[in-house]
Image (cartoon, rainbow, N blue to C red):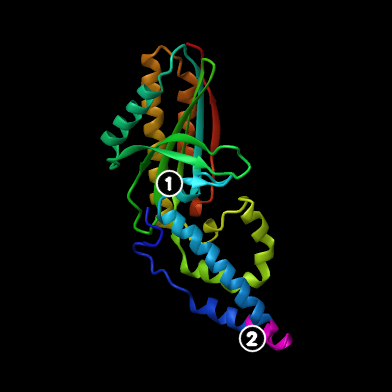
Amino acid sequence: MDLINSKNINNRIKKRTLYVAITVHTILATLTFGISLIFLAIAGTVTKLLLKKDIDKAKSRNESFNKNYPFGYFGRTLGSFQHIFHHSYSIEQDIYSAIEKELKSKTPITSVKSIAIIDTDPDLKNCEQRSFIKAESEPTSRGTTITLLLNQSNFGSMRTIQWRVLAGGYVDKNSEFNLIAYSLFTLLSWIGPYIRGEVDVLSRVRTIYPGAYNDMDVATQVRCLHEVVFDAMIAELKKNGIDTSELNLQKMQVANINIPGGKVKVGNLVQGARA
């Protein structure tokens, strides 16, 4: 995923944004005899450095996080489903293999790989690592990349497969400028939570381009990925004698996912049957 490549979008700082920021700070500097510019320089520098740190970390594909936002690098979640079922034996790898086969045969996705995401929360005695299966599409013509993440867990002989589809945009230069230009007013509101790992600064400057055609492209990819996962899971669970009637009903809701500007989040818990 390239955070800088906006594809067919002219990624720039807009003239109006510049004029408004200059006007605001000119008036404020006049009223404070220039003192506000000193604080702006300090706040802007701190904001720019922290933002650069987050961007560099994302570019390095360092798949770790501090307490919250484990999937921040991949973007916003646009649909999350979980299926719970009972089975005496773990069939995790069979399900993963079935999903990978369906993805490669029905979509342009050619690479499905396992990744480890690490929680580096300093309050933990030891960092915790969990495994996920990741599949990523090519960006849309307006710079939005769709990623599928799957993970599995057990509670005794109860099994759960969870998957989420995320949309990641490019770093918008206009949003980046605004974050720095108005840091004098906003820095104190988020610097504390940021240090505690409760605020994701990168998400404030990334954008899923809000255009009708991009909405259509993103919605198509999101629905198709959910459809493929449902089909693969249903087929594999049936092979193992597990009832999939509720999963079939849940699959029908995928068509109702609406994604204007990548802002709608659809999440559901799917309760499976005993085997």
Residue drawn where x is 35% and y is 22% of the image: 94
Q: Position of residue 170 (x, y in %)?
A: 43, 59
- The question of residue 89 being in magenta is answered with no
Residue drawn where x is 48% and y is 75% of the image: 14
- The question of residue 32 being in magenta is answered with yes
Residue type (three-letter) at the residue carrying disc 2: Thr
Q: Nearer the viewer, mark 1 or mark 2?
A: 2
Relative placement, left or right, of 123 versus 5 is right
Relative placement, left or right, of 102 versus 122 is left
Position of 198 relative to 236 (above/below): below
Q: CA distance from mark 1 to mark 2?
A: 43 Å
Which residues fall within the magenta stretch? 25-35
User: Where does label 2 land, which residue?
Assistant: 26
Which labelled disc corresponds to residue 227? none
SS label for mark 1: helix
Residue drawn where x is 33% and y is 27% of the image: 97
Position of 179 relative to 238 (above/below): below
User: Where does label 1 land, which residue?
Assistant: 219
Q: Position of residue 38 (x, y in %)?
A: 65, 80
Residue type (three-letter) at the residue carrying disc 1: Ala
* Other-residue count near label 2 (Cα within 10 Å), few / some / many at <14 / 14–19 / ≥20: some
